[in-house]
Amino acid sequence: MRVIPKDQVIFSFNPHNPNRYEVDDGETFWVETDDCYSGQIKDKTVLRPDIDISIMDCSVGPIGVKGAEPGDVLCVDVEDIQFAPQGVMVTSPGLGVLGNRITRADTKIIPIRGGFAFFSDTIQLPLTPMIGVMGVAPARGDVHCAIPGDHGSNMDTKIITIGSKVYLPVSVPGAGLALGDLHACMGDGELSGTGIETAGKVRITTTVIRGLALKRPVVETADSIYVIASAATLDEAIPVAVEDMTALLMKKKSLDFADAYRLLSATCDIQISQVVNDAKTVRVRAPKKNLGIESFYP
Ligand code: CA
Ligand code: ZN
């Protein structure tokens, strides 16, 4: 199986990045990634203010998927996520929701082994593997990999995990897929500004879907479908996600707007993915079983 190494990276998603790798439609492959600090924090003596932030938040790629054309949808099946033997969590003044409470920078190295993150001698966390950044080239603009949007990127959404399918709207030939920013553990919100940031590798299968209209990322898990929206504020992101889910219910259940809107209110949850990036990310969750929906696609 092909392994895409981490030496070709992008720092922003744009339509003009040349594809650095090419895979087949339907191919399964591994992608290796550094952590979000590009491996600069190897031990606790390296503090967040000391590192070169210009090489933070890079993503491995772009990976061109043969046959993908603007207007198509790229489905990324996340099959496995494996981690390096340690992760890092920094705190630094201004970082995260209560960054004003942090007076000095501090770095915590967190060993990872046997399916656990060893946060301290007494606190061992089962891993909750996730991919922080996964995106495709947008139709226009030049969007830093730290900023999520309709093209995906830094959504920091914990349900982008092993077993999930991530649907992304294709805007350029080949799609220009890139990913990185793996987290061994992260809770909704990413409240202190970081997950357990860890290098590693992911095994994915990329499939091109034609004839499916999609404006923004959708994630499907075994029991749920999520629509994901990012905007400058949560208040702006919420109605975008709610509109997308209402449209999805109209289509899947053959309902008019008012009835789909009621069904959404009766069954779906608004959830926060992250509140610490330059754009905030929310998702609306639809429970597949209760709604009698087998899958997002077909
Ligand atoms: Ca992130
Ligand atoms: Zn991260």
Image (cartoon, rainbow, N blue to C red):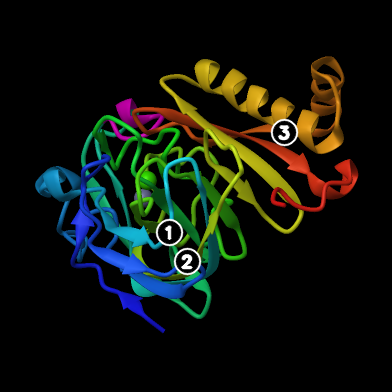
Q: Indicate which disc, 3 or 2, sits on the residue closer to the N terminus.
A: 2
The 10 Å Cα crowd at callout 3, few under 14, some 14 to 19, many 20 or more, is: some
Query: How busy is the neighbourhood of tag 1: few (under 14 within 10 Å), some, or many (20 plus)?
Result: some
User: How much space separates mark 3 and mark 2, taking CA atoms?
Assistant: 26 Å
Q: Amino acid at mark 2?
A: Asp
Q: Amino acid at mark 1?
A: Gly
- Earlier residue among tags 1 and 3: 1
Residue for point 75% across, 39% down: 286
Q: Which label belongs to residue 67?
A: 1
Q: Secondary structure at mark 1?
A: loop
Q: Residue at 62% of width from left, 37% of height from top?
A: 227
Q: Which residues are magenta?
A: 94-100
Q: Tell me the residue that label 2 is attached to.
A: 25
How far apart in space, not on screen, are marks 2 and 1 (Cα)? 7 Å
Of the two numbered discs 2 and 1 in the rendering, the one whose residue sits closer to the viewer: 1
| Mark 2 or mark 1: whose residue is earlier in sequence | 2
